[in-house]
Structures are given as structure tokens and as C-alpha cells.
């Protein structure tokens, strides 16, 4: 079930919140668990059993590790958890790669559908196991709390990736209030609008441009497309994350924010402190720091950064373009750290120009999985189209005419201004009116079938 | 619960002041839902229990929203007043079947349309200089001619007097056989079982009208008009004819919308214009129509055919000398073809077949470019498209070539 669907908003959420608020506080975890399983089962009727099974197995291991502190148990459960992820998400990719290298079908492909949210779920549960192993005293968690934490519907499909510490207090004791409900609902409406009104509409520009051929674009058209995708993925994911935080608030949780105006960054290093913050946190705490971080000399630091970014890329998708995407960041971050990072941070204008050139290119690498098409598109951006320019100024003018206003709005919402304004004025009556109207328009759009499934859904 | 004493102020922290937006949304949408339930139940369509089971996944008012998006306030009102699409269009269908066959100005064959009777003395078998015989069946007079040499090419037999003419040589009964350029054939196959309000599978695929086509060069299109949706827009962009022909197309164009507002988008000006005005001015020698993709979810195939027939009739009236090319809608890729909804190739094929049924080979022919781009299952080849619906620019160049190779010289 998508957050941006009528079924979720007008059926599930209404019924769930009614039951949840009527329930006594001490039983609300159970209600949340049940509701979350129903929510997940609606989208994945078969995998919900695997999910439940994984939760149970993980809890058993948690208790064992908690009691004994044996590292061996941690290793086993990590193998099991990552193994499940590998099986569902990476088996065919790995098999295909091996087969290609060997020139024959050594390893067969598996016909398994990718369960929704498995990448997020796996990382969250692994984080819990490692946290528990490191600091057992802090983690006295009942099965109900653990199961609820792992499966709660605001975050199970697309994050934020939680550490138990983010919600430990609220798992024990949380209160709902009319103000929190209102706050959460407003945030939800804000996020919904970002996704439905901005992301879904600008995505049609990207699709239109790619549809005309990725090897026949003029330079301005190719870059326009790249910017369209840049906006699309941001508002899609940021919108979703805001909806998650908003829903969490309605339930009484303060979930961590995943985005902090990433397009204001002046360097790629800064970008990744502002984009998908909980993922960056995960890789830092469970990969980078354990491997030594930056403490063991330059060579090891570079090696660690390389591993982190290769894995970050791979986490985003089982395809070589995602690995290339991650490695691109490795190169840029290493260069920034060792050469020009300080220059960019000091000089805001150069930094922003640098980012405006670099980020859309990275998103194109992310967006196009077919390598032939990716090379074609990048060549168009560089002014060397494979088949000569066919989509040219006429089309460019048409796109600017059709999407110009939307692009300006996207640009505005890429700044800090809208969120800041919202935060200071969210209790004013005119913002109320605006949000209500915006919500209405969003619903009209959804009903008109204009919603694209959330981009990060294939995770 | 105690009521406030009259004259005292309301407490500042009432529920409404704490969560106003939430309450407004709840009340508003509850009202909408209750309203649509009341409408449905009172119209006798279903019981309350029926409403709840029917709308388990989505609220009842989404149907009204869809109507509003499609047809504006008019559409919404029609839904409320029970003037369903089906009823309206059934009425229109009845009209078409008894409508006049007008526009005897189309004289095909080697004739020359001229009002100078003497020139026609030596011209066989054409008839020229007819005034428009409009309205009613041409069982009225074929009047106003000086000389009627050869046949009066019209679509109906000319009964009644052929008066006001100087000389009528040749037979008037030749009216029954106007020149036919080609025959539209259909391939049959075993149909799939579908239960959809939008389409059926009639087990037939239309083929390009069997004609003696000529290959033309680009100048052929200097008096051409193209009507269509985003695929026609692609042709506009990549055929090379954008400065030669007139393109009346727009993304999302549908016959359904056209039948409501009678507007088309003129690519020259970039604005919408009145259909009748657009085709009442310049005289076109050929008009290419490709519509249907955006009609897949609006009404059924008969309604679609009715609307297309209306467009063709209007064009035949306004542009009697134009040959109308009905172009088959390009199929979609297999990944997009979803039999459980309206968007699939079976529905599209149904619409194409309905379109081809209107290609009489006299004023209209049917061109199907799909074999160039589809696989054996009839799906658009995945490597030719990005989004499953549109060809790459190079594909449109191929399509333009196909059109150039299939021209009917009148």
C-alpha cells in the first residue's frame, strides 16, 4: 500500500487511527504491530510470513546474544539477515555476472519477486543486533516492542532506517495528543503534496525526454532532463520521508529526519550529510567506523571510503550502474577531501555551480540501468550524441513552456525557505487554508491516476 | 456536557483550536463519503451494504472526481443527473445512422471538378459542377448543372428528378458505384475472454486497406492535415513535415474530449482552436487521423466508433476533396499492456478494428504501421521505446517513410 493512495489515506489510516486512539496506551504497541502487518500484507501477501519469521528468528538471536554476548551468534544472525537480502535482491545479479564472466550458465537464476522494503528492513534489524551486541545494558526489549519496532508501518517500506535508540523511550511510554495528531497530519499533507504535485509531475518531463531517444538529444535538452530527474527523486523521497515522520508523530513517535535541504550543499561530502541521513548514519556506524574510519592512515581511509561507497551504491539497486553511481561519489569525495574541498566550502558560489554540474550527472547514472542507454545519455549531455541531434530547440522551447512554472516551483522548494516558512507559520490560519487546498488538489491528482509508485519502492 | 453560558467566551484550548486541519479534513471527507453513499442508495443503484462492499478500497466520491477531471462541471452534473455517457451516446448513434450522406462534391476518378460545363463534355466518367447536395438523402435533385456527363458520383442512388441540367448522358444509376480505391480486410483469430465495460475481443485485426498505393515525396504533405495525440506530435517533431503540413495534435488528445469541447490544438500557434474553424478555411488534399490511445478508458468501442464517425462526417463535409487516412494506433509494449484494466493491446486492437470498419476505401482508407514495430504477439518491441507507449525519434522517421509509401493519388 502506498502512502499516496486513496486506499491508505481514506481506508487504512482512518480505521487504524480510530482503533489506535480508542485503545489504552499500554496496548497500543500490539495494535500498531497488528496494523503494520496488515499494512504490509496488503502489498505483499506472501512475504509477510517471511517477514514475521525473520522477526521471530532475530528476536531469538537477540535474547541469546544479550544473555551470552557470544560474537559467534552475531555472525550467524548477520549471515542469515544479509543472506535473505542477498537471495531476494542480489542472487540474479550475482549469477548473471558470474555467468557472463564464464561465458556459460553456471548459476541459475531464481524467480523470486523482490519484497517491498527488504533493503530497509534488513539494515534496520542488523543495526539492532549490532547495537545490542555492543551495548547490551541499553537494550531490554520485549518481543512485542522488537516486533513493533521492526515492522511499524510508517517506516517499514522506505525508512527512515531507525536505531532502536531513536524510539526506545516512546516504545515504553508515549502519549498521543490532539496537537501531535495535527502536527503529524500537517507534515503528512506537506509530504504528500511534494510527492504528488511536484515529483510525479516533473517526472513526466524526464520520461518525455528519454522517450524521444537517449542518443539524439541536444545538450540543453539532455541537461533539462537530468534536472527534471534530479527534482523528481528528491521530492519523491523527501516527500515520502516527511509522510513517514508525520505518521510517526500521529502515533506518538518522533522519527528522525532523512533530509536536510541537500541541494543547498556546496560539496558532495556535505550532500551526503544532508541526503538520506539515516542511511549515511548506518554506513558510518556499522561499516566505516568498525573498519577504522580515517584513523589508520591515508591508504586505509581511502580503502574504507571506497568500500562504503561501493556498498552504498549496491544497496540502492542490483545493477552495475548503481555501483558505478556509488563509486562516482567515492572519487568525488576523495578528491574533495584531498584537493579542492576547502575551496568549495569557502566559496559558496563556486561550490553551488560545482554541485549543479555534478549532481544531475550522478542522478543520470543512477536513473538509467541499461549501460548502452546510459552511455548514450551522458554523451548527449557532453554534446556528442551518438546519432546526431534530433530532439532540439523546438522541443526544448515546448518543454520550457509546459514545465517552466513547475521547474521554478521545484527550484523554490529546493531551497530552505518553504520548510522554514512552514515551521514558523504552521499554526497560522492562512497556512491551514493553504494546506487544506493543497491536500484537496493532491487527492484530486491521486484519484486521476496521476501517481507514480514511490521511486524507492523497489528497495 | 454543559453548554457555555451565553455571553461567555469559548475556552482557548478547545479541540478545534488544537487540531483544526485534521478536523476540517475529517468532516469534509466524511461529508463527501456520506453524500456519495446517499446518492448511490437513493438512486436505487445499491443498498448501503452494497455501497460499503463496493467501496471497500476507495471512497465512493472518486468516481465523481474522475468524471470531473474528464468532463469538468458538465461531466460531473451529468453523472449526478443520471445522464450517463452510455445513454447520451446511444442517442447520438441513432442520429448517425439516419443522417444524410452529403458532399457529392467528392468526385474521384479522373474527373476534374469545374463549374464550366463545356470542359466536361469530353470528360468521362466524372461529373463536375455539382452544387453541394446536403441534407437529406440525395433523393432530391441533382440540380444546377449545365451538363452532367458520366455519373453523378454520390453515395446514394439518385432517385427523383435530375432536373435543371442541360444534358444527362450516361446513366444516373452510376451513382450507386462511386470509385473505390481499396478494400479493408480483417484477419481473424481466436478471441480472448474479457469482461470489460471498455472493450471486447472480437477476434479480428484490421489490415492496411488494400490499395494501389503510390510513393510520394515530402511535397505531398504541403496540403496535409494531421489530427492526433502525442504520437502524432512525435510525427510532427521528427517527420520533417512540420513546416509543410498542418498538425492539430496534443498530448492526451481524445475523441471523448473532442466530442465535448470540439477543440483541437494547433501546433503552429501552440493554442487550442475550434475544430470547425480550423477545417473551414484552408482546403486540404489529405487528412491523417490517429486517435484512440487516450480514449481507451472512456466509454466502449461503439461509442468510440460513433465519435470517430462524427469527426469523419464533419471533415467530409468541410473538406470534400480530402482523402482521409485513418491511422492505426501504435500498440503498447508488453510491460504496459494490462488486461485487468482498460490499457492493453486487446482494447487498442478493438478500437483499431472499429476505426478500420469506417474505412470505406472511397473517402477513407486505413493505414496500419504496427507491423513495423511490433513482435509476433502484437506488442511494441521493448527496444524501440522507453516508456512503452512512444517510439524513439528514429522510429518516427521510419513511420513517416511508411506514410510516404502509402499514399492514394486521387
Image (tube, coloured by chain):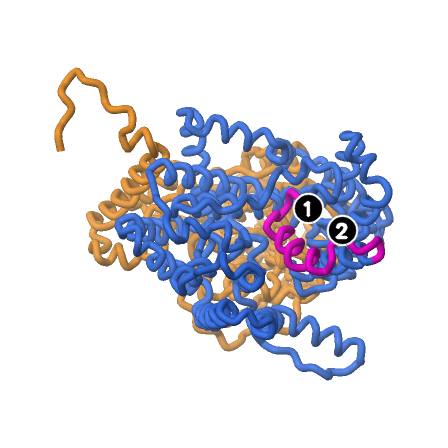
Chain colours: A blue, B orange
Q: Nearer the viewer, residue B312 or B147?
A: B312
Callout 1 secondary element: helix
Provide the residue span drawn in magenta.
A272-299
Q: Position of residue B73 (x, y in %)?
A: 39, 36
| Prevailing secondary structure of the magenta residues | helix
Q: Is residue B335 above or below residue A2?
A: below
Q: Is residue B22 above or below residue A456?
A: above
In this picture, residue A164 sits left or right of residue A75: left
Q: Label 2: few (<14), some or many (≥20) within 10 Å?
A: many
Q: Nearer the viewer, residue B89 or A187?
A: A187
Residues at badges 1 and 2 in contact (C-beta under 8 Å)? Answer: yes
Q: Is residue B115 above or below residue A237?
A: above
Callout 2 secondary element: helix
Q: Which chain contains the residue that carries disc 2?
A: A
Q: Label 1: few (<14), some or many (≥20) within 10 Å?
A: some
Q: Residue beneath label 2, please?
A: A329
Q: Residue beneath label 1, please?
A: A272
In this picture, residue A340 sits left or right of residue B41: right
Gap in angstroms between the C-alphas marked 1 and 2:
9 Å
Amino acid at each position: 500500500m502506498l502512502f499516496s493512495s486513496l486506499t491508505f489515506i481514506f481506508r487504512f489510516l482512518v480505521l487504524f487511527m480510530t482503533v489506535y486512539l480508542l485503545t489504552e496506551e499500554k496496548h497500543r504497541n500490539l495494535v500498531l504491530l497488528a496494523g503494520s502487518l496488515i499494512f504490509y500484507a496488503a502489498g505483499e501477501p506472501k512475504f509477510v510470513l517471511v517477514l514475521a519469521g525473520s522477526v521471530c528468528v532475530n528476536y531469538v538471536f537477540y535474547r541469546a546474544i544479550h544473555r551470552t554476548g557470544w560474537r559467534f551468534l552475531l555472525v550467524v544472525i548477520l549471515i542469515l539477515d544479509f543472506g535473505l537480502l542477498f537471495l531476494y535482491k542480489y542472487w540474479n545479479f550475482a549469477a548473471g555476472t558470474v555467468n557472463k564472466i564464464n561465458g556459460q550458465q553456471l548459476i541459475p537464476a531464481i524467480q523470486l519477486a523482490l519484497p517491498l522494503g527488504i533493503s530497509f528492513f534488513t539494515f534496520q534489524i542488523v543495526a539492532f543486533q549490532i547495537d545490542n551486541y555492543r551495548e547490551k545494558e541499553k537494550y531490554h526489549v520485549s518481543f512485542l516492542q522488537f516486533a513493533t519496532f521492526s515492522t511499524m508501518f510508517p517506516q517499514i517500506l522506505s525508512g527512515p532506517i531507525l536505531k532502536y535508540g531513536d524510539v526506545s523511550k516512546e516504545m515504553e511510554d508515549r502519549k498521543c495528543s490532539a496537537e501531535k495528531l495535527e502536527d503529524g497530519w500537517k507534515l503528512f499533507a506537506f509530504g504528500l503534496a511534494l510527492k504528488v504535485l511536484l515529483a510525479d509531475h516533473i517526472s513526466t518531463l524526464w520520461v518525455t525526454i528519454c522517450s524521444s531517444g537517449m542518443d539524439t538529444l541536444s545538450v540543453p535538452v539532455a541537461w533539462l532532463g537530468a534536472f527534471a530527474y534530479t527534482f523528481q527523486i528528491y521530492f519523491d523521497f523527501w516527500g515520502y520521508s516527511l509522510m513517514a515522520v508525520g505518521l510517526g508523530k500521529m502515533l506518538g513517535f518522533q522519527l528522525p529526519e532523512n533530509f536536510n535541504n541537500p541541494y543547498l550543499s556546496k560539496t558532495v561530502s556535505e550532500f551526503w550529510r544532508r541526503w538520506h541521513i539515516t542511511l549515511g548514519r548506518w554506513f558510518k556506524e556499522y561499516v566505516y567506523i568498525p573498519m577504522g574510519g580515517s584513523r589508520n592512515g591515508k591508504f586505509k581511509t581511502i580503502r574504507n571510503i571506497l568500500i562504503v561507497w561501493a556498498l552504498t551504491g549496491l544497496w540502492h539497486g542490483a545493477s552495475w550502474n548503481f555501483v558505478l553511481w556509488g563509486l562516482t561519489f567515492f572519487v568525488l569525495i576523495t578528491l574533495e577531501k584531498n584537493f579542492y574541498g576547502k575551496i568549495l566550502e569557502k566559496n559558496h558560489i563556486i561550490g553551488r555551480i560545482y554541485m549543479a554540474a555534478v549532481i544531475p550527472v550522478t542522478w543520470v547514472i543512477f536513473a538509467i540501468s541499461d549501460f548502452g542507454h546510459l552511455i548514450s545519455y551522458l554523451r548527449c549531455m557532453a554534446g556528442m550524441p551518438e546519432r546526431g541531434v534530433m530532439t532540439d530547440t523546438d522541443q526544448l522551447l515546448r518543454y520550457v513552456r509546459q514545465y517552466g512554472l513547475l521547474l521554478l516551483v521545484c527550484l523554490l522548494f529546493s531551497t530552505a525557505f518553504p520548510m522554514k516558512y512552514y515551521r514558523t507559520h504552521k499554526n497560522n490560519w492562512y497556512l491551514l487554508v493553504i494546506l487544506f487546498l493543497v491536500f484537496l488538489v493532491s487527492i484530486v491528482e491521486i484519484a486521476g491516476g496521476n501517481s507514480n509508485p514511490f521511486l524507492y519502492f523497489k528497495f | 456536557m454543559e453548554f457555555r453560558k451565553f455571553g461567555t467566551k469559548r475556552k482557548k484550548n478547545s479541540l478545534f483550536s488544537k487540531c483544526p486541519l485534521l478536523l476540517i479534513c475529517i468532516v469534509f471527507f466524511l461529508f463527501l463519503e456520506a453524500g456519495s453513499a446517499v446518492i448511490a442508495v437513493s438512486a436505487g443503484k445499491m443498498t448501503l451494504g452494497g455501497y460499503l462492499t463496493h467501496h471497500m478500497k476507495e471512497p465512493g466520491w472518486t468516481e465523481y472526481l474522475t468524471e470531473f477531471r474528464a468532463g469538468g462541471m458538465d461531466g460531473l452534473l451529468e453523472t449526478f443527473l443520471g445522464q450517463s455517457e452510455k445513454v447520451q451516446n446511444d442517442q447520438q448513434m441513432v442520429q448517425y445512422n439516419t443522417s444524410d450522406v452529403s458532399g457529392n462534391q467528392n468526385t474521384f476518378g479522373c474527373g476534374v471538378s469545374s463549374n464550366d460545363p463545356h470542359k466536361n463534355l469530353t470528360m468521362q466518367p466524372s461529373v463536375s459542377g455539382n452544387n453541394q447536395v446536403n441534407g437529406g438523402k440525395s433523393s432530391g435533385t441533382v440540380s444546377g448543372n449545365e451538363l452532367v456527363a458520366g455519373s453523378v458520383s454520390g453515395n446514394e442512388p439518385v432517385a427523383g428528378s435530375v432536373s435543371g441540367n442541360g444534358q444527362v448522358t450516361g446513366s444516373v444509376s452510376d451513382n450507386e458505384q462511386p470509385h473505390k480505391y481499396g478494400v479493408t480486410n480483417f484477419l481473424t483469430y481466436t478471441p480472448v475472454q474479457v469482461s470489460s465495460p471498455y472493450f471486447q475481443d472480437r477476434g479480428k485485426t484490421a489490415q492496411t486497406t488494400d490499395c494501389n498505393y503510390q510513393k510520394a515525396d515530402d511535397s505531398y504533405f504541403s496540403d496535409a492535415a494531421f489530427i492526433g495525440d502525442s504520437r502524432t506530435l512525435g510525427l510532427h517533431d521528427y517527420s520533417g513535415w512540420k513546416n509543410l503540413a498542418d498538425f492539430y495534435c496534443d498530448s492526451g488528445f481524445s475523441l471523448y474530449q473532442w466530442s465535448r469541447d470540439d477543440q483541437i490544438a494547433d501546433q503552429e500557434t501552440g493554442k487550442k482552436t475550434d475544430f470547425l474553424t480550423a477545417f473551414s478555411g484552408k482546403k486540404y488534399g489529405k487528412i491523417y487521423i490517429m486517435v484512440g490511445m487516450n480514449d481507451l478508458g472512456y466509454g466502449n468501442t461503439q461509442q468510440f466508433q460513433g465519435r470517430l464517425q462524427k469527426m469523419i462526417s464533419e471533415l467530409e463535409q468541410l473538406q470534400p476533396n480530402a482523402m482521409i487516412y485513418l491511422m492505426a494506433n501504435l500498440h503498447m509494449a508488453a510491460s504496459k499492456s494490462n488486461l485487468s484494466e482498460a490499457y492493453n493491446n486487446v482494447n487498442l486492437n478493438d478500437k483499431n478494428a472499429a476505426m478500420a470498419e469506417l474505412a470505406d476505401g472511397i473517402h477513407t482508407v486505413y493505414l496500419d504501421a504496427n507491423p513495423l514495430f511490433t513482435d509476433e504477439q502484437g506488442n511494441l518491441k521493448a527496444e524501440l521505446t522507453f516508456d512503452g507507449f512512444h517510439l524513439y525519434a528514429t522510429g518516427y522517421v521510419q513511420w513517416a517513410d511508411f506514410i510516404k509509401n502509402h499514399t492514394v493519388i486521387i
